[in-house]
Amino acid sequence: MTSASAPGKIILFGEHAVVYGRPALAVPVAQLHADVEVSDSSKDGIWIDAPDINLHAELKSLPSNHPLAAVIDKFFTLLSSPHFRKTKMGGQRGVEIKIISTIPVASGLGSGAAVSVALIRALSSHLSRPMTNEQVNALAYEIEKIHHGTPSGIDNTVITYAKPVFFVKGQPIETFRVGKPFTIVIGNTGISAPTKEAVGDVRVLWEADKARWEKVFDKIGEIAEKAKERIENGEWELIGDLMNQNHALLQEMTVSSPELDRLVSAALKAGALGAKMSGGGRGGNMIALVRPETAEAVSRLLKEASAKNTIITSIHP
């Protein structure tokens, strides 16, 4: 048996604008993770057991565009080995793939990308076909296209490298330094919100008035640049106002929601230094920058404001 794990992620700044070439900042969330085990089996075929989504099925029974089937098919296409039985499996006729994830689905925390990355790494290890981070990232991005339509690539990148990432679409990967640790409270609305739909709606807005939205994207990009500089300098307290500015622009973009806005307001009233939605929007999660001593109080008040659950996470150098 071989296994692999991949973390969740949150976007600090730049969601949606990143699709249009502006920078975004994202960090891994170690408390959340997807775990994949691959083991030889006496049963014929490739079997997938994913209890979190009530799936136990043979690979060939899944449609070709099913994300898990697509990961496996693209993996073997990359290795020029379309079926397990054509590899050296120690005499076994098939394999069992078990997938467990603590990352909520469709919540902006990188669930799909984390499962893809963990699955790719577990398969490559099981078959003794090691892959570089660049190869894993490229393959996971292809799967993100199924999840999100026109993804930026930020989810698969920060999850593959498991480091804070300053991401610009089409440019070389750039990690960034965290000058001093800071604390974020993540509040989950409990509303499933597929990123693909929000990304598509923003594209409709952009196509109808490119001049207007390019200016909005520019503002978001400038905010991300300033935030990176302040985080690297250890001036994390100063990114709170940048969060507020970024959230206002996302509201203008129509990707926030009453539930997200309510949690953002509650966090600020509870003493957060700044707050914004994170990810695709229309549900999913928001994030709040807090002083460590106020994290529990902000978390409690977010739950009172209808957050389904909260996570307190620290971003370390």
Image (cartoon, rainbow, N blue to C red):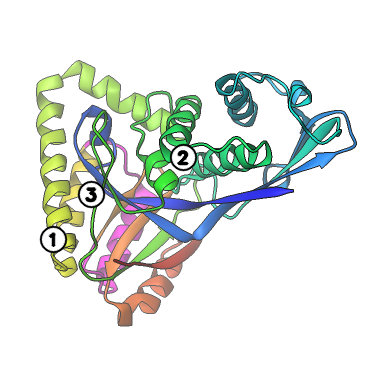
Front of the two marks 1 and 3: 1
- In terms of secondary structure, where does tag 1 sit? helix
Q: Where is residue 37? Give x, y as percent.
A: 69, 47
Mark 1 vs mark 3, CA separation in Å: 18 Å
Q: How many marks?
A: 3
Sequence-earlier tag: 3 or 2: 2
Question: Residue tagged by mark 3?
Answer: 247
Q: Residue 258 magenta-drawn?
A: yes
The kind of residue on which mark 1 rests is Arg
What segment carries the magenta color? 253-274
Q: Nearer the viewer, residue 185 or 80?
A: 80
Question: Residue tagged by mark 1?
Answer: 230
Q: Residue 71 magenta-drawn?
A: no
Q: Nearer the viewer, residue 204 or 266?
A: 204
Q: Where is residue 234? Give x, y as percent.
A: 16, 68
Q: Is residue 134 above or below residue 189?
A: above
The disc placed on residue 193 is 2
Q: Nearer the viewer, residue 24 or 38?
A: 38
- In terms of secondary structure, where does tag 2 sit? loop
